[in-house]
Amino acid sequence: MSEVAEAQGHAFTLSGATLVARGTGALYWPAQSLLCVSDLHLGKSERLARRGGSALPPYETQDTLQRLEEEISALSPKVVICLGDSFDDAAAADALDEPALLWLQRLQAGRKWVWIEGNHDPGPVGLGGTHLAELTESPLTFRHIAEAGGSGEISGHYHPKAAIARTGGRARPCFLIDAARVIMPAFGTYTGGLRSQHAALSPLMEPRAIAVLTGPVARAIPMPR
């Protein structure tokens, strides 16, 4: 396993595959040289402005792409999977400015890039790469929303968050992991989330599920319920 990946994440096994939940919110599969990120929500500030919503500083696309570039530079993956809701809506993908378009092209160069469809966007079909509803790379399946009875499943959608209760700490984006699945945190800037105690999440995860909190150190705790 890559020393960089191991030092900056929590290693675990899912369906026989050794994976690393990184403190950045990205998931790395060393054996396949595969990097997965979920829920980039690029263009959120543009969508809110377009629809007359709350104003946000218009830098979230640049910040998200910068952090994604840092992950790619650190790990040099052969495959990158964007696990749905890569854009805040389809119009946000069309509104991407030229510097951001060129940035994405640089990140895609020389590697396989897969856009998984999300509920916010159908996959940015004009931005290169492969566009799929879901992807199976045995023994794992990558899809946007977890399915009941899923096994070896990597998904996103819910933007899970958790905190260490005894310290009164601020809730942080987290991975939820059990023997059957991983629900990934949102990688994008300005993405909210659901506490792991939420009724939408608890039924999906087995009793012994853990939460891996993101941050400078990826910290694994029993999943708060």
Image (tube, rainbow, N blue to C red):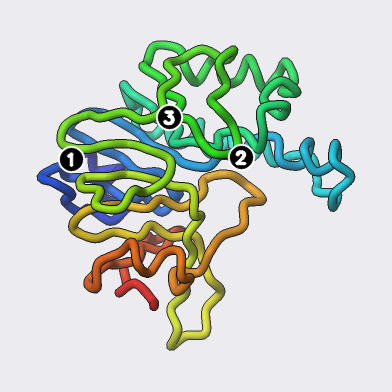
Ranked by sequence position, the earlier of labels 1 and 2 is: 1
Mark before the other along the chain sequence, 3 or 1: 1
Identify which residue is drawn at 38% across, 69% down. 202
Residue 66: x and y in percent read: 58, 35
Left or right for 45, reference 136: right
Q: Residue 170 lies in what quarter of the image?
A: bottom right
| Residue picked out by circle 1 | 1
Q: Secondary structure at mark 2?
A: loop
Q: Amino acid at mark 1?
A: Met
Q: Residue furthest bottom?
A: 166
The residue shown at (79%, 36%) is 46
Q: Secondary structure at mark 1?
A: loop
Q: Distance from label 3 to label 2 (Cα)?
A: 21 Å
Position in image of residue 49 (x %, y %): 85, 40
Q: Are marks 1 and 2 in contact (CB under 8 Å)?
A: no
Q: Residue furthest left?
A: 16
Circle 2 is placed at which residue position?
A: 41
Q: Is residue 96 left or right of residue 168?
A: right
Q: CA distance from mark 3 to mark 1?
A: 16 Å
